[in-house]
Amino acid sequence: MENTQNNEKTEKKKIVFSAIQPSGTITLGNYLGALKNWVIMQEEFNCIFALADLHTITVRQEPAAFRKNVAEAYASLLACGIDPEKSLFFIQSHVTTHAQLAWLLNCYTQFGELSRMTQFKDKSAKHADNVNAGLFTYPSLMAADILLYQADMVPVGADQKQHLELTRNIAERFNGLYGNTFKVPEPYIPKNGARVMSLQDPTKKMSKSDENVNGFITLMDNPDVIMKKFKRAVTDSEARVAYGEGKDGINNLMSIYSTITGKTFEEIENEFDGKGYGDFKTAVGEAVVEELRPVRERFERYISDKAYMKECYTKSAEIAQKFSQRTLDKAMRKVGFVLK
Ligand code: TYM
C-alpha cells in the first residue's frame, strides 16, 4: 500500500475493504456486483481484500473441497485483476485479529439486531439442521473485518447492504460509549450490476448455491456453456427488448449487458429495436464470454503456481496483522482490558 506523495503534503488515500467467501465457484453476480469494482478501485485507493474463510464454515464444508475452494478462489481473484503489488489480498483466518475483534463486537451487538438479518433468516431456513451460533453472529465478524482497517468504503453487492448498516450501527454504538475508535464505513454499491438475478428465476438473486446450474454463470464456465445458459434464460412473451415492470428476465439481461458494455438502457433498446430475444440473448452471451475469457486463461496460470500464491497471501497477511492489531489494541484498551 503506497501513499500518494506530492511536494507540499502527503495526501492519505481512502481505505477500501471488502471480502468474498471461498465457498465454491465464483459467479457472474460476484464479479459484476463486487469484483469488477474492486479491480477498478485499486487504482485510486488503498485496497484491502480478503477471502472470508472464517465466514464459510458457518455452513458445513467438506475439508478437502474447502481447501481446494480457497486455492481456487485466490487464483480466480488474481485472474480477475486483483494485484497484490497494489492491494493487500489475504486469507481471513491468517490474520488473528478478525476473530478477536469479532468476539468483542459480539458483546456490543444485540440479539434482536442479528435476528432481523435477512441472510440469517434465509440461510437458517435453507440449512435447518445446522442453525449454529456462527451463522447467527456472522454479521459481527463481518463488522470486525471492516472496522479493523478503519475502512472508508466497502464495495459490495446489494445483498450485503443490511450487514453494512449493522456494521455502521455497531461502530457508532462503540464510538458513542468510548469515544472515537472506529471509522464509520460507507457502503459502495454499484448502480448497475448490484443485483444480478438468476437466469432461470429472475426474481431470485444469482447464487452459486442454486440447485439449477442453468441459473448461474461461473467465472470458469467455458464459452459454449455460457452461450447455452444465456439462450435458455427465462424471459417474457412480449419479445421486445425494453426495460419495464413484469419483465424481470429482460431487465436482468439488460443490466448484465449494460454493466459489461457501458451502454445505457436507452442505447440497448435502440440497438435491438425490431430484433427478437434470440438476437439479444446471443449478444449478452457473447459479451459475457469476451469479458470472462481472459479471466479463465489467467486462472490456469495462477492455479498452477501455488508458490506464487502463497508468497502473495503470506506477505499480505503479515502487513494486515500489524495494521489491524493497532485497531484491536485501541478498542481493547478503551473497554478496559489490561494489554500485555
Ligand atoms: P459473498 O461471498 O456472498 O459475495 C461476495 C460479493 O459478491 C456480491 N454478490 C452479488 N452481487 C450482485 N449480484 C449477485 N447475484 C451477487 N451475489 C453476490 C456480494 O454482495 C459480495 O459483495 N459476507 C460476505 C463476505 C464478507 C464481506 C466482509 C464483504 C465477509 N466479510 C466484509 C464485505 C466486507 C459474503 O458472504 O459475500
Image (cartoon, rainbow, N blue to C red):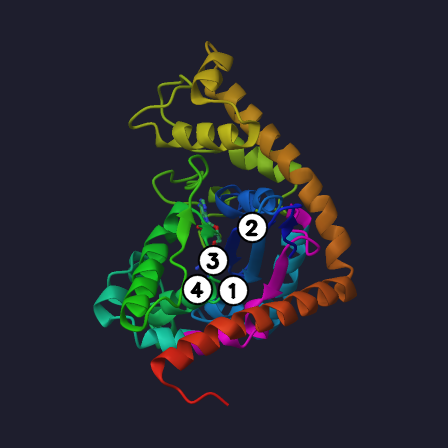
Of badges 4 and 1, nearer the viewer stands 4
> The residue under label 3 is which amino acid type?
Ala
Sequence-first disc among 3 and 1: 1
State the residue lying farthest toward the top. 274
Q: What is the crowding at mark 4: few (fewer than 14 residues within 10 Å), some, or many (at least 20)?
A: many
Residue 236, position as x, y percentages in the image? 36, 26
Question: What residue is rendered at 57% in x and 58% in y?
Answer: 48
Position of 166 with respect to 38 (left or right) is left
Whether disc 1's CB lies below 8 Å from ligand 1 is answered yes
Mark 3 touches mark 2? (CB < 8 Å): no
Position of 138 with respect to 17 (left or right) is left
Q: Which residue in the structure is indicated by mark 4?
A: 147
In magenta segment, residue 90:
yes
Mark 4 touches mark 3? (CB < 8 Å): yes
Residue 211, position as x, y percentages in the image? 44, 52
Sequence-first disc among 4 and 1: 1
Q: CA distance from mark 1 to mark 2?
A: 24 Å
Q: Which residue in the structure is indicated by mark 3?
A: 151
> The residue under label 2 is which amino acid type?
Lys
The boundaries of the magenta stretch are 79-101
Quarter where residue 203 is shown = top left
Q: Which residue in the structure is indicated by mark 1?
A: 52
> The residue under label 1 is which amino acid type?
Ala
In magenta segment, residue 49:
no
Q: CA distance from mark 3 to mark 1?
A: 16 Å
Q: In what quadrant of the picture does the N terminus appear?
A: bottom right
State the residue lying farthest toward the front. 8
